[in-house]
Image (cartoon, helix red, strand yellow):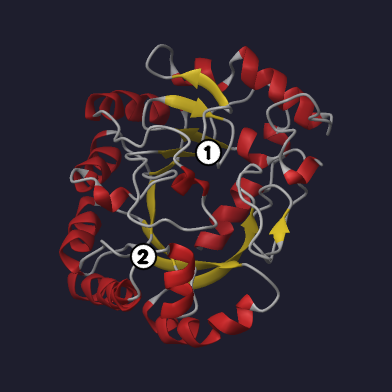
Amino acid sequence: MSITDRIDAITGISERYLSDVLPAPRSVKIELTARCNFNCSFCARSMRLRELKDMDRELFFRVVPEMRAAGVEELGLFYLGESFMVDWLEEAIRFAKQEAGFPYVFLTTNGSLSTPERVEACMAAGLDSLKFSLNYADAEQFHQIARVKRSLYSKVLKHIREAREVRDRGGYATGLYASYIMYDGEQGERMKAVVDEVAPFLDEVYALPLYNQAAFVEGEGWEFTAGNRGRFENLRDPLPCWSAFTEGHVTWDGKLSACCFDHDGRFHMGDLTAEGFMEAWNSPAFRTLRQAHLKRDVCGTVCEACVAYA
């Protein structure tokens, strides 16, 4: 199954998940760290609306098998931070694959820290998918948006090429992908040169719309899409929002969130340090929020501020 097929299977809410009480989500993203070495202007993480720390390893080792036992099939070892900043990332991958038994473990990275040595360790540990967030057409746009030094851009491109070399040399099965954000009507054209450059080293490259990250980010003259509607070429209806129905999001401190962009904790629906995963997944707060989504009226809920519902 291609990465875009997997994405579409999550963002398209099946009949089975159109309820307030749900079976385990097919996919969960768990935040090994909230830290990131970029300060992207499109990402509210740089606003530092919460503590930016790493997950306690014991919490990870406890909740991951529980989620698998509940029926979760796909585990993303990231959420709002850059997981290559965590020195036990490879151990987390190995545990998720070999101990917890997840069929599919995936990771998204900004690419700046994904050296060949670390990528090979991740692949050897069983990583099924590595996606690079390639959100910049050139070094100048990279500098302006990521707000880090320009020289890192060439390093990201180098790491993409080297990841393919590592995979081919080691015979690993890890899928290699990249995505980019459509900031405006011109970005697709701007991206053509760099996409052509990296495409031979990747299995798939696809575009994402620009999200306003739960109404935190605005301005820049960009074109924000309503809510989180999936891939740019397969946008879903904003209501009900798939994020509250088909994918779990676990923050570094063990909170289960209803939103892909919970930068300040307002979307917390449960606490995995104090309750089980399925208990939190079908908590009273989560059920009430889902009921509002199913009615396509989220006025008065934590989702009200999102431009999707304005």
- Which mark lies nearer to you, 2 or 1? 2
For badge 2, the amino acid type reads: Val
Seen in the image, is 31 located left or right of residue 287? Answer: left
Can residue 245 be seen here? The reply is no
Q: Residue 109, how many percent across, how many down?
A: 37, 58
Q: Residue 154, how many percent across, how many down?
A: 32, 79
Q: Kindly state the secondary structure of the residue where label 2 is placed.
A: loop
Seen in the image, is 115 located left or right of residue 73? Answer: left
For badge 1, the amino acid type reads: Arg
Which residue: 23% across, 62% down? Answer: 119
Which residue: 28% across, 72% down? Answer: 159
In the picture, the quarter occupied by the C terminus is top right
Which residue: 78% across, 49% down? Answer: 237
Marks counted in the figure total 2
Seen in the image, is 250 located left or right of residue 171? Answer: right
Q: Which residue is mark 2?
A: 148
Q: Kindly state the secondary structure of the residue where label 1 is placed.
A: loop
Q: Residue 161, how many percent across, how many down?
A: 30, 78
| Number of residues whose C-alpha sits closer than 10 Å to that of mark 2, classed few (under 14), some (14–19) or many (20 or more) | some
Which residue: 61% across, 44% down? Answer: 216
Q: Which residue is mark 1?
A: 26
- The quarter of the picture where residue 97 lies is top left
Check the image and report above or below for 173 versus 77: below
